[in-house]
Amino acid sequence: MKRAGILALLAALCPLTLFAQTPSIIVTGGKIFTNDPAKPFVEALAIRGDRIIATGTDEQILASIVGTQNVRRIKLDKHVVVPGINDAHTHPGLGPVGLVLGTGAASTFAQVSAALSAAVDESAPDIWLIGEVGGAVMLDESVTRATLDQLAPNRKVLLRSFTGHGTILSSRALQELGIENNVTDPLGGRFGRNPDGTLNGRAFEYAEYPLIRKIGELTQLQGDLTVALSSFSNEALRFGITSIQAMPFEEEKAFRQAWDATDSPIRLRHIFIPLVVPPPLPRPGPPPRGTNGLKWILDGTPIEKGAAVRTPYPDGGGTGRQNFTTITRLLRRGPETNQQLLLHAVGDAMIATVFKEMANISGINWPAERPRIEHADGLLPDLDPQARTLGVVAVLNPSHFFARTLFPPGGFSRAKSLLAANIPIAIGSDGPLNPWLNIMLAVHRRDNPTEALTREEAIAAYTLGSAFAEKQPDKGMLAPGKLADLVVLSQDVFTVPVTALPDTRSFLTMIGGKIVLEEWPPELP
């Protein structure tokens, strides 16, 4: 058969779109998970510029380059490809800098005390002493500035809950920050006080956040933030993360300048978190330049028993707390500034309040706004109808699922049943960055097996779901016309033992048709 006849036959067997453009890159011989319902898995795809132009079998894609030159061919040798991971909720940055105590979420106060005493002996007197703690310390109200002052006299001490929703400061630390006993509680936050009204060193929510930023500004040296973000970017690329939806606590301009200085190829969505909400509430106006999205923190977490719940916590911990007495103006602020709302609302009482107030605001097409509930642990089944009516997206954090048992009984920390209820889900880390660890936690639900996702569902939530959550229809699917953001993985994430998933790494990460990480093993051609 003559060459013209061969090409005619191939054209008849292949979609015409394969020949509409000449590819610059083809990827063949693999197991490619597309997120495209029409073709969930394919062998090969073709790329031109920053877009995918075709997917199909090896034969179909190879036909698209017959008679052409200067086309790079990536031979997968049966390796798995998935769309680039899109972390829908992460907090890159550096924060306060000082001598880290080496404590953590599970530390007892005895362990914190020992670490603090040792740090006093081996550090200069002007260094900040910084420790991470968990519920054991944050729920022990006897741990106050007086306690820290006794263990570390005249030292700047910061103990912070690993959740970011509670802080204990020494007297010297409060003095350094200019916080005096007559300080008033800000909207959305509170300072802990002794019976006589003096500060006890504890600060929560919107009382805490400006202090953490200020400590960071006092302790970070020039270039520190850029170095931290560069390390973050390099780690993310090796995990196959191509997009991040970032909620930094650093000052917006400083964060953006430091991120730009990294020259990272990762797609950044910089979400604005107002850390101060002074009375009167800010007038409508755009968030800082370079940001996209507006986040409000409406309650706390179950670790400190701060998530607002409708049924009391099982061990007498009350029902949590809503940070604001009313949220109507906060909710309106999103549509007024043409910014998507991202609402930290963990407890079921908080989510119920959000839905009630949204429904009472007239003149807003909420599904078009696509409001997000960050964490969504308390999005319980009775709230599903309202969630669907309002067009809510639930952004889940699998590393939080362990805390399900801290909530009152009632089906907290859902995943599978949200999909069954036709509520869109996305996944963000908000903790360990490793997406394959988070995917393992989503599919291996020892806390509640009925809420386990399949591997395909979890990867879809981390890619296509996250793209939907940020209103980016070009991302998250490997199909013609979509962005060529993809990852070649070190193992078959659909078949390896579930406990091996966290070991997954990227052999090749591509963003917009450009290879930004390439670490092929020797056995690959």
Image (tube, helix red, strand yellow):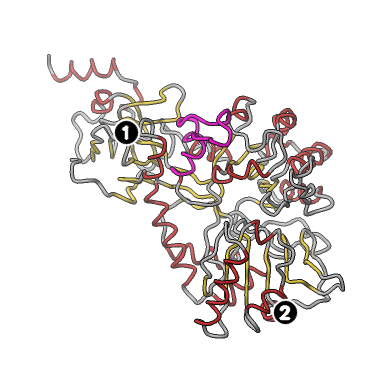
Q: Does residue 328 belong to the magenta stretch?
A: no
In this rendering, the answer to whether 386 lies above or below 525 is: above
Amino acid type at image mark 1? Ala
Q: Nearer the viewer, mark 2 or mark 1?
A: 2
Whether residue 449 is in magenta: the answer is: yes
Q: Earlier in the sequence, mark 2 or mark 1?
A: 1
Q: What residue type is labelled 2?
A: Gly
**In the structure shown, which secondary structural element does the residue marked by tag 1 occupy?**
strand
The quadrant in which residue 176 appears is: bottom right
Q: How many labels does the image show?
A: 2
What residue is disc 1 on? 46
* Cβ–Cβ under 8 Å for marks 2 and 1: no
List the residue tagged with mark 2: 178
Report the side of 283 relative to 438 (left or right). Answer: right
Residue name at image x 60 percent, y 33 percent: 424
- The magenta stretch is 436-461
User: Quick one: label 1, few (<14), some, or many (20+) residues within 10 Å?
Assistant: many
Looking at the rendered image, the quarter that the N terminus falls into is: top left
